[in-house]
Image (spheres, grey):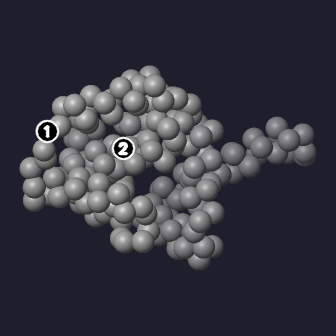
Amino acid sequence: MPDRKTIEKAREDEREGKSPGTQAGEFVSAEIDKIRHGEHGARSTKQAIAIGLSEARRAGVDLPPPRKGTVKESTRKSAEYAYEVGQGERTPKRRPKVSKAVTEVLEHEPTSTASHEALSRQAKQAAARRTPAERSAAAKKAAETKGAAGRKAAAQKAARTRAHRAGRDGSAR
Protein backbone atom coordinates (compact mmCIF):
# COMPACT_ATOMS: atom_id res chain seq x y z
CA MET A 1 0.00 0.00 0.00
CA PRO A 2 1.46 3.39 -1.00
CA ASP A 3 2.09 5.92 1.74
CA ARG A 4 0.16 9.17 2.09
CA LYS A 5 3.05 11.31 0.84
CA THR A 6 3.18 9.45 -2.48
CA ILE A 7 -0.58 9.74 -2.99
CA GLU A 8 -0.44 13.46 -2.13
CA LYS A 9 2.41 14.04 -4.62
CA ALA A 10 0.39 12.29 -7.34
CA ARG A 11 -2.71 14.38 -6.49
CA GLU A 12 -0.57 17.53 -6.69
CA ASP A 13 0.67 16.46 -10.14
CA GLU A 14 -2.96 15.96 -11.18
CA ARG A 15 -3.91 19.45 -9.94
CA GLU A 16 -1.00 20.89 -11.91
CA GLY A 17 -2.43 19.24 -15.04
CA LYS A 18 0.40 16.74 -15.47
CA SER A 19 -0.18 13.49 -17.37
CA PRO A 20 -1.30 10.24 -15.72
CA GLY A 21 2.14 8.83 -16.59
CA THR A 22 3.81 11.55 -14.55
CA GLN A 23 1.41 10.92 -11.65
CA ALA A 24 2.18 7.19 -11.83
CA GLY A 25 5.88 8.05 -11.83
CA GLU A 26 5.54 9.09 -8.18
CA PHE A 27 4.45 5.55 -7.28
CA VAL A 28 7.19 3.94 -9.37
CA SER A 29 9.76 6.20 -7.70
CA ALA A 30 8.44 5.22 -4.25
CA GLU A 31 8.66 1.54 -5.21
CA ILE A 32 12.27 1.93 -6.35
CA ASP A 33 13.07 3.60 -3.00
CA LYS A 34 11.43 0.70 -1.11
CA ILE A 35 13.59 -1.80 -2.98
CA ARG A 36 16.75 0.28 -2.48
CA HIS A 37 16.08 0.48 1.26
CA GLY A 38 15.65 -3.30 1.39
CA GLU A 39 11.95 -3.49 2.28
CA HIS A 40 11.67 -6.10 -0.48
CA GLY A 41 13.27 -6.96 -3.81
CA ALA A 42 12.17 -7.55 -7.38
CA ARG A 43 13.00 -10.21 -9.96
CA SER A 44 13.65 -7.53 -12.58
CA THR A 45 13.57 -3.78 -13.07
CA LYS A 46 10.45 -4.27 -15.18
CA GLN A 47 8.73 -5.95 -12.23
CA ALA A 48 9.65 -3.06 -9.93
CA ILE A 49 8.12 -0.60 -12.40
CA ALA A 50 5.03 -2.81 -12.85
CA ILE A 51 4.43 -2.90 -9.08
CA GLY A 52 4.57 0.91 -8.98
CA LEU A 53 2.16 1.23 -11.92
CA SER A 54 -0.25 -1.22 -10.28
CA GLU A 55 -0.21 0.79 -7.04
CA ALA A 56 -0.86 3.96 -9.04
CA ARG A 57 -3.88 2.40 -10.76
CA ARG A 58 -5.26 1.13 -7.45
CA ALA A 59 -4.80 4.59 -5.91
CA GLY A 60 -7.01 6.12 -8.60
CA VAL A 61 -4.54 7.46 -11.19
CA ASP A 62 -6.32 7.53 -14.56
CA LEU A 63 -3.82 5.20 -16.24
CA PRO A 64 -5.70 2.78 -18.51
CA PRO A 65 -4.44 -0.81 -18.82
CA PRO A 66 -2.31 -1.68 -21.88
CA ARG A 67 -4.12 -2.61 -25.09
CA LYS A 68 -4.53 -6.24 -26.19
CA GLY A 69 -1.47 -7.71 -27.85
CA THR A 70 1.02 -5.28 -26.29
CA VAL A 71 1.69 -7.30 -23.10
CA LYS A 72 0.94 -10.75 -21.70
CA GLU A 73 -2.79 -11.37 -21.23
CA SER A 74 -2.34 -12.07 -17.49
CA THR A 75 -0.50 -8.74 -17.08
CA ARG A 76 -3.25 -6.90 -18.94
CA LYS A 77 -5.97 -8.54 -16.81
CA SER A 78 -4.11 -7.61 -13.63
CA ALA A 79 -3.77 -3.99 -14.82
CA GLU A 80 -7.46 -3.92 -15.77
CA TYR A 81 -8.44 -5.17 -12.29
CA ALA A 82 -6.23 -2.56 -10.56
CA TYR A 83 -7.63 0.20 -12.80
CA GLU A 84 -11.25 -0.77 -12.01
CA VAL A 85 -10.45 -0.80 -8.27
CA GLY A 86 -8.91 2.67 -8.53
CA GLN A 87 -11.84 4.03 -10.51
CA GLY A 88 -14.31 2.67 -7.94
CA GLU A 89 -15.90 0.26 -10.42
CA ARG A 90 -15.23 -2.77 -8.20
CA THR A 91 -14.29 -3.51 -4.62
CA PRO A 92 -11.05 -5.45 -4.22
CA LYS A 93 -11.24 -8.96 -2.79
CA ARG A 94 -9.12 -9.32 0.33
CA ARG A 95 -6.80 -12.31 -0.05
CA PRO A 96 -4.48 -12.30 2.98
CA LYS A 97 -2.84 -15.66 2.18
CA VAL A 98 -1.97 -14.57 -1.36
CA SER A 99 -0.77 -11.17 -0.13
CA LYS A 100 1.49 -12.77 2.49
CA ALA A 101 2.86 -15.27 -0.03
CA VAL A 102 3.69 -12.52 -2.53
CA THR A 103 5.37 -10.43 0.17
CA GLU A 104 7.50 -13.40 1.29
CA VAL A 105 8.56 -14.15 -2.29
CA LEU A 106 9.51 -10.50 -2.95
CA GLU A 107 11.58 -10.39 0.24
CA HIS A 108 13.89 -13.06 -1.24
CA GLU A 109 14.37 -11.26 -4.56
CA PRO A 110 17.48 -9.17 -5.28
CA THR A 111 17.57 -5.43 -4.57
CA SER A 112 20.16 -4.80 -7.30
CA THR A 113 17.28 -4.58 -9.81
CA ALA A 114 16.65 -1.02 -8.55
CA SER A 115 20.27 0.11 -8.90
CA HIS A 116 21.16 3.13 -11.05
CA GLU A 117 22.82 0.81 -13.59
CA ALA A 118 19.80 -1.49 -13.84
CA LEU A 119 17.37 1.42 -14.27
CA SER A 120 19.64 2.99 -16.89
CA ARG A 121 19.80 -0.30 -18.79
CA GLN A 122 15.99 -0.64 -18.65
CA ALA A 123 15.48 2.95 -19.89
CA LYS A 124 17.90 2.43 -22.79
CA GLN A 125 16.19 -0.82 -23.79
CA ALA A 126 12.76 0.84 -23.64
CA ALA A 127 14.02 3.77 -25.75
CA ALA A 128 15.58 1.40 -28.29
CA ARG A 129 12.17 -0.21 -28.85
CA ARG A 130 10.76 3.15 -29.97
CA THR A 131 11.34 4.52 -33.47
CA PRO A 132 13.51 7.62 -33.95
CA ALA A 133 10.36 9.55 -34.94
CA GLU A 134 8.62 8.58 -31.68
CA ARG A 135 11.67 9.58 -29.62
CA SER A 136 11.93 12.89 -31.45
CA ALA A 137 8.23 13.64 -30.95
CA ALA A 138 8.55 12.90 -27.21
CA ALA A 139 11.57 15.22 -26.95
CA LYS A 140 9.74 18.03 -28.79
CA LYS A 141 6.71 17.67 -26.52
CA ALA A 142 8.95 17.73 -23.44
CA ALA A 143 10.69 20.88 -24.67
CA GLU A 144 7.34 22.60 -25.28
CA THR A 145 6.02 21.88 -21.80
CA LYS A 146 9.28 22.98 -20.14
CA GLY A 147 8.95 26.75 -20.66
CA ALA A 148 11.70 29.26 -21.44
CA ALA A 149 13.38 29.14 -18.01
CA GLY A 150 13.31 25.34 -17.99
CA ARG A 151 14.83 25.16 -21.49
CA LYS A 152 17.59 27.58 -20.47
CA ALA A 153 18.40 25.53 -17.34
CA ALA A 154 18.42 22.29 -19.36
CA ALA A 155 20.74 23.81 -21.98
CA GLN A 156 23.14 25.03 -19.27
CA LYS A 157 23.13 21.61 -17.61
CA ALA A 158 23.80 19.91 -20.96
CA ALA A 159 26.73 22.27 -21.59
CA ARG A 160 28.18 21.50 -18.14
CA THR A 161 27.79 17.76 -18.77
CA ARG A 162 29.55 18.02 -22.15
CA ALA A 163 32.40 20.00 -20.60
CA HIS A 164 32.72 17.52 -17.72
CA ARG A 165 32.77 14.52 -20.06
CA ALA A 166 35.32 16.15 -22.35
CA GLY A 167 37.61 16.70 -19.35
CA ARG A 168 37.10 13.16 -18.05
CA ASP A 169 37.87 11.51 -21.39
CA GLY A 170 41.23 13.28 -21.53
CA SER A 171 40.35 15.15 -24.72
CA ALA A 172 40.71 18.95 -25.01
CA ARG A 173 38.33 21.04 -22.93
Look at 75% across and 41% down and name the residue there.
164
Does residue 101 appear left or right of residue 154 in this picture?
left
The residue at which mark 1 appears reads as: 94
For residue 77, say whether it is visible: yes
For residue 26, say whether it is visible: no
Image position, residue 117 (x, y; %): 63, 38
Nearer the observer, 9 or 3: 3
Q: CA distance from mark 1 to mark 2?
A: 18 Å
Instruction: Give the amino acid at mark 2.
Output: Ile
Look at 56% across and 58% down and name the residue there.
126
Image position, residue 114 (x, y; %): 52, 35
Instruction: Give the amino acid at mark 1.
Output: Arg
The residue at which mark 2 appears reads as: 51
Nearer the observer, 160 or 19: 19
Judge depth for marks 1 and 2 and give the one in front.
Answer: 1
Q: Secondary structure at mark 2?
A: helix
Look at 38% across and 37% down and name the residue there.
31
In the rendered image, the quadrant that contains the C terminus is top right
